[in-house]
Image (cartoon, helix red, strand yellow):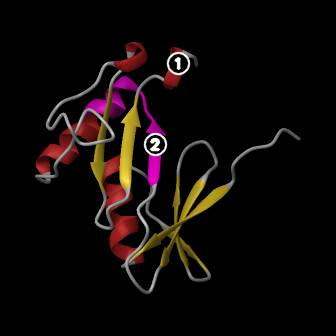
Amino acid sequence: MAVQLNHTIVLARDKQETARHLVEILGLPEPTTFGPFVVVQVSNDVSLDVADDHGKPHAQHYAFLVSEPEFDQIHERIKERGLAWWADPFHRRPRAVNHDDGGRGLYWNDPNGHSLEILTVPYGGWG
């Protein structure tokens, strides 16, 4: 078997709010629960297992490879909710989309300050 990422734990102040943000913005299926986790499943068999972090979570970065139509839909949801977004991970280019590697990408923050990214072409333009 080839090594594959199966899941990662996303720490949150409110696991329900964080899971809801992910499924609504990204257009994913309703989350499920498994023990103390609210599980958000993405299409490549990887799950984001959201758990309450009894305190302020340490911000992490999560990047999602999406199709061109999905990018447009997600970008529209970000705008509809009045969320800030940037073309770069350092938040220097507000309300802009990057065109790195021949695709499109943008960044926004979830309710816990995690940096979320959507991109249509993987880094380096492969895929």
User: On the rendered structure, is 97 left or right of 47?
Assistant: left
Assess disc 1: are there few (<14), some (14-19) or many (≥20) residues with their C-alpha within 10 Å of its C-alpha: few
Q: CA distance from mark 2 to mark 1?
A: 15 Å
Q: Which residue is mark 2?
A: 63
Identity of the residue furthest to the top in this view: 102
User: On the rendered structure, is 61 left or right of 45?
Assistant: left
Residue 113 horizontal/vertical position (percent): 32, 62
In the rendered structure, which disc, 2 or 1, sits on the residue that comes first in sequence?
A: 2
Assess disc 2: are there few (<14), some (14-19) or many (≥20) residues with their C-alpha within 10 Å of its C-alpha: some
Residue 124 horizontal/vertical position (percent): 53, 18
- Residue 110 within the segment the image draws in magenta: no
**Residue at image point 43% right, 16% down:** 101
Residue 56 numbered tag: none
Foreground: 98 or 45?
A: 98
**Residue at image point 21% right, 43% down:** 85
Residue 56 horizontal/vertical position (percent): 37, 78
Residue 32 horizontal/vertical position (percent): 52, 70
Residue 124 numbered tag: 1
Foreground: 119 or 98?
A: 98
Q: How many marks?
A: 2
Above or below — where is 83 with respect to 13? above
Snapshot quadrant of residue 23? bottom left
Above or below — where is 115 with respect to 104? below
Q: Which residues are magenta?
A: 61-72
**Residue at image point 29% right, 42% down:** 90
**Residue at image point 46% right, 49% down:** 62
In front: mark 2 or mark 1? 1
